[in-house]
Amino acid sequence: MAKITFDGIEIEVPDGTTILNAARQIGGGIVPPAMCYYTPLKGTGGKCRACLVKVAAGSAKDPRPMPKLVASCITTVQDGMVVENTISQQVMDVRKGIVEMLLINHPLDCPVCDQAGECDLQDFAFEHGVSTTRYEEERRTFEKIDIGPLIQLHMTRCILCYRCVYTADQLTPERVHGVLGRGDASEIGTYIENIIDNEFSGNVIDVCPVGALTDKTFRFKQRVWFTKPVNAHRACENEKCCGKVTLWYKGKDVLRVTARKDEYGEVKEWICNTCRFDKKETSDWVLEGPAHINRASVIAQNHYELPVVNPQVIADLPESTTRELERNPPLRLGGLNN
Amino acid sequence: MGRKLLTEHINVEGINTFEVYRKHGGYRSVEKALKTMTPDEVTEEVKKSGLRGRGGAGFPAGMKWGFLAKPEGVPRYLVCNADESEPGTFKDRQLMTKLPHLLIEGMITGSYALGARTSYIYIRGELLYVLRILEKAIAEAYAAGFLGENILGSGYSLDLHVHPGAGAYICGEETALLESLEGKRGNPRNKPPFPAVQGLYARPTVVNNVETIAAVPVIVNEGGDEYAKIGIGKSTGTKLISACGHLNKPGIYEIELGLPVEEFIYSDEYCGGIWKGRELKAVVAGGSSVPILPKELILKTAAGENRLMSYESLSDGGFVTGTMLGSGGFIAMDETTCIVKNTWNFSRFYHHESCGQCSPCREGTGWLEKVLHRLEHGHGSMHDIDLIVSVAKQIEGNTICPLGEAAAWPVAAAVRHFRHEFEWHVTNPKEATAPGAVYRGAAVLA
């Protein structure tokens, strides 16, 4: 175990924990933002530099400060380490610089972007950015490529976090997309204009922190804050698929299906493309109740209406569960036209 | 006349062949090390020599060797970084072209010291003809029994491979080099873990520059203490300086560290002064990534002492009035040089060569280049000058690898010392963009 001080708060975590994960155990506003790091994906992190923190004392043994800011997502804790995040002006200034860098070539097309409302970059910019830009040059654009009927690629929005590359490496048998080109001409692409087609490809949509990879079947259908997330599950035939999802309702229609995300936007259990793209009827699912949405999120700003549940699904539940649901309803029970 | 440790026989006819090289005392260090010394003794000699990494950072080579993790039963590697691509640096190319066996000898002795059974030379993709020279030399060394199984009957075996890059500057960064050598995209890795613990194929690895490895035979032959007597202070031994730019005699010079910069530029033994009888304006002393210094500061330090060609003297004054020895790419600029244009040119290079992995470098290098392009072409504003300094500061220190710094430092230094010239481009755009126009005002010294 290692005892560290993060923004003045002491916490003891197992050896080998990263600074970011130690901070997440404390939770709240002191947690550094992470745009590229993704806990379930091995090898991610260190690229976006959004989570840079100051190490004021390296360890109890060697209490010298680290010369540069370090990426908290990949730097492991040492016993006696003292880390400064929000209390360090230097860190805050650097973070402002990182937002600026990430935004100079970003199209800022949030008004038409499907990711708006659940976009990490939007949140990051809202928290640490400034309202003006010093960038006068033309923004970078890319030639559009089609990566298949299910996933929409908007390369101009990409921040090159590499998450989707790791996802394809670790979830799917063969990766057909990757980073082509170099420097600010790097782009996510398939060589040559291949189609991303395998049962778990849809997960790249969930891991994408921005609107670069979005669900084609949900495209322009609805702003996410007008939809209502409801947790549901089904017994998926694919044994690698967990079958646990969030359904996004508008009225009684399921507009899209995503994997469940935790409070840091991370998917811990992956779902297959059948669950994601093909099962868009309430009757396909066993509903569990409204998905937890962070209060700070714009999605939570809207009033929740309990979604309507297919009576057939209810009928299949054991009686004890039905009674419990009636007494303490997370859902409105009844017919579809009720 | 300084001593020549590496290049003594460089102009001997046929020195690139095994026979001639051997006749001039080649491969003695292999015999000495394998027959009379333990690996640790070789490492100890390198430590004693005070040899510092010649690739740019100047980290003590012996200490780097000492950091190598040596778990039982796990292979270790020595990798030679021959991906020399820093603008202004061309010493390794010459060394490998003329003296391929010197590098191979260093690789054998070095690998023996580190306990490596397989070693690699990662060579810049553009140097394909040098790769052929090296491969031929390696074949000769195999034939003579200096490579392969049971070298010289000592029981030590070594395989040496040459691998070409595909022309990316970033692959000269040691972890990007290892990625590329493994056959992946050449993106620098996050550190730690350092290569000494997890390098090539996640095994302990030492990555050294060509010139560093080429100095190992000399150290083993003459002894670390003898080597340490050459040079000045902590800058021991000799260094190859590739001098280019507006000099009467540009070229590669092997100097004893501690040579006064003034002597290096003006004496007939070295660069022979500035061409066409012009005045020196500025010098980039260690390859394009180190801060540029105006004439006054490169010849004398801020304290008025003579500036010497050594790690310490060149960095005297930090980045306010100093620079770095870097890789020894010495670029001299005469009075007709436009610093704004030069800075833009450097920026363009780093923009082109950024790997695009981490955001400050990917976005920042392009931004710098575009603003500098504007300034150079007379479309800039005063605000732009502060903007590039600010952007450079946002990149510096916040990136995965040192390429960010390499892009930021030259810009920051150029504005620091030649701010008036940038301002002149803003206030007199017509004059400044006219062909052959030069600003002749004084540089800012502190």
Image: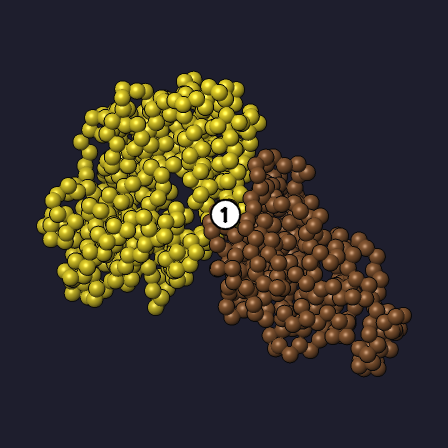
Chain colours: A brown, B yellow
- Is B6 on the left-hand or right-hand side of B189? left
Q: Residue B148 appears at what percent x and percent y?
A: 21, 64
**Residue B322 can be seen, yes or no:** no
Label 1 element class: helix
Disc 1 residue type (three-letter): Ala
Q: Would residue B269 appear left or right of A177 to someone viewing this image?
A: left
Res B299 quadrant in image? top left
Label 1: how many Cα within 10 Å (few below 14, some 14–19, many 20+): many
Residue A261 rendering spot, x and y as whole percentages: 68, 62
Which residue is rendered at x = 25% and y = 27% of the image? B248
Which quadrant does the N terminus of chain A fall into? bottom right
Residue B432 screen position, x and y as percent: 46, 21
Q: Is residue B222 visible?
A: yes
Residue linked to disc 1: A185
Q: Of A142 and B255, which appears nearest the observer?
A: A142
* Quarter of the picture holding the C terminus of chain A: bottom right
Q: Nearer the viewer, residue A133 or B360?
A: A133
Give the x, y percent position of residue B260. 28, 28
Q: How many marks?
A: 1
- Closer to the camera in the image, A144 or A46: A144
The residue lying at 33 percent from left, 37 percent from top is B88
